[in-house]
């Protein structure tokens, strides 16, 4: 079954949030099916794709090249650990907490509000983080 949308950023692979979504986005991009409006890659330092690859100590381009060869999510995560770094449990906990709360009363909160406005979700008070916004835009919330 072909992917239609990347999975929720809340879903974990190897205990790490967002990594599975990143793999889905890469796979969709490689198949020519990633919608144009999706942030993809490392164009800006704050994009979650770039943050995730930096967290794992691999380059975005190297991960794309590795995904082209195939493999399960877990295989690809093990490759990241071998090629880059394997974060400790504490680092993963800090990563997960930071990522799940990004946009909640922090330096980029206005980005969440702007995203809500652009998506026609401005009145939704339950959307306070980028992960929640992504899920709402993709019909999961």
Image (spheres, helix red, strand yellow):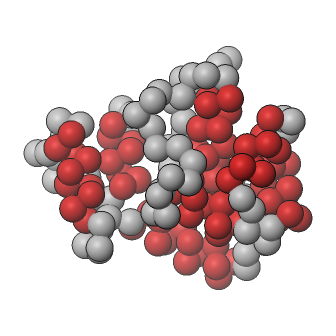
- Can you say which quadrant of the picture contains the N terminus? top right
When the figure is inspected, residue 110 is found, relative to residue 92, above or below; the finding is above
Residue 17, percent across and down?
A: 58, 58
- Quarter of the image for residue 108 reads bottom left
Closer to the camera in the image, 68 or 10: 68
Q: In which quarter of the image is the C terminus?
A: top left
Question: What is the x, y in percent for residue 83?
Answer: 86, 63
At horizontal 56% and vertical 72% (from top left) the residue drawn is 95
For image coordinates 23% across by 37% down, the residue present is: 119
Residue at 68% from the left image edge and 29% from the top image edge: 30
Whether residue 10 is visible: no
Write down the quadrant of residue 71 in the picture. Answer: top right
Up-down relation of residue 17 to residue 34 (above or below): below
Residue at the outermost left position: 123
Image coordinates for residue 123, horizontal then vertical, percent: 11, 45
Q: Vertical placement of 31 versus 103: above or below?
A: above
Q: Which of 79 and 101 is in front in this view?
A: 79
């Amino acid at each position: 079954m072909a992917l239609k949308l990347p999975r929720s950023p809340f879903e974990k692979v190897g205990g790490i949030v967002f990594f599975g979504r990143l793999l889905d986005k890469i796979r969709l991009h490689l198949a020519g099916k990633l919608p144009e409006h999706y942030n993809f890659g490392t164009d800006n330092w704050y994009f979650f794709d770039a943050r995730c690859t930096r967290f794992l100590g691999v380059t975005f381009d190297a991960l794309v090249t590795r995904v082209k060869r195939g493999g399960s999510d877990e295989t690809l995560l093990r490759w990241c650990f071998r090629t880059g770094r394997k974060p400790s449990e504490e680092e993963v906990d800090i990563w997960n907490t930071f990522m799940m709360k990004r946009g909640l009363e922090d330096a980029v909160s206005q980005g969440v509000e702007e995203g809500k406005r652009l998506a026609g979700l401005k009145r939704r008070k339950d959307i306070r983080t980028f992960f929640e916004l992504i899920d709402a835009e993709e019909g999961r919330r």
